[in-house]
Amino acid sequence: MILANYTKATIISGVEYCHINMVVHRDLKHENVLLDSRFNVKIADFGLSNVMQDGHFLKTSCGSPNYAAPEVISGKLYARPEVDVWSCGAILYAVLCGTLPFDDENIHNLFKKIKTRDVGTA
């Protein structure tokens, strides 16, 4: 549990650093959160990232479906940082519970679970 709390704090700190520097990652998932030998968190794969600009919204549906915010998978406009916060929640849920909060082999069922916030009985 101590490692989970440390990991949670450092993931949030890393994402906060990105947002302070006007970068939204848009593909946060556990595969993109790396630990070095001293358990320092490194956020990787900024291939879908974007630089935030005041007054500009994003609409691109991108990232990994299991970690994507409802507005991303719905193709709605989003104001950027909140989609990373959602993804952090999915990562932290998986760290603490050992399973993804939203999972289904059928992509349409997965999207329905995400949109209705149906985490099932995990």
Image (cartoon, rainbow, N blue to C red):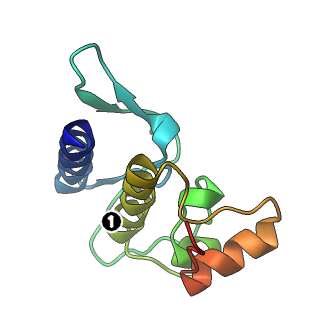
Amino acid of disc 1: Pro
Q: Quadrant of residue 33?
A: top left
- Quick one: which residue is furthest to the bottom in this view? 116
Q: Quadrant of residue 118?
A: bottom right
Quarter containing the N terminus? top left
Secondary structure of residue under mark 1: helix
Would residue 74 be visible to someone looking at this image? Answer: no
Q: Which residue is mark 1?
A: 81
Quarter containing the C terminus? bottom right
Q: Say left or right for 2 vs 68.
A: left
Instruction: Name the residue at 35% across, 70% down.
Output: 82
Number of numbered tags placed on the structure image: 1
Q: Where is residue 20 drawn, in percent x and y? A: 16, 55
Q: Say left or right for 44 vs 22.
A: right
Would residue 103 be visible to someone looking at this image? Answer: yes
Q: Where is residue 11 drawn, in percent x and y? A: 27, 45
Q: Where is residue 22 drawn, in percent x and y? A: 25, 55
Q: Say left or right for 49 vs 54.
A: right
Instruction: Name the residue at 38% across, 28% down.
Output: 34
> Which sits in the foreground, 89 or 32?
89
Q: Quadrant of residue 112?
A: bottom right
Picture layout, residue 84 above or below residue 18: below
- Quick one: which residue is furthest to the top in this view? 37
Picture layout, residue 97 above or below residue 37: below
Q: Residues within 10 Å of mark 1 (few under 14, many from 20)?
A: some
Q: Say left or right for 13 vs 117.
A: left
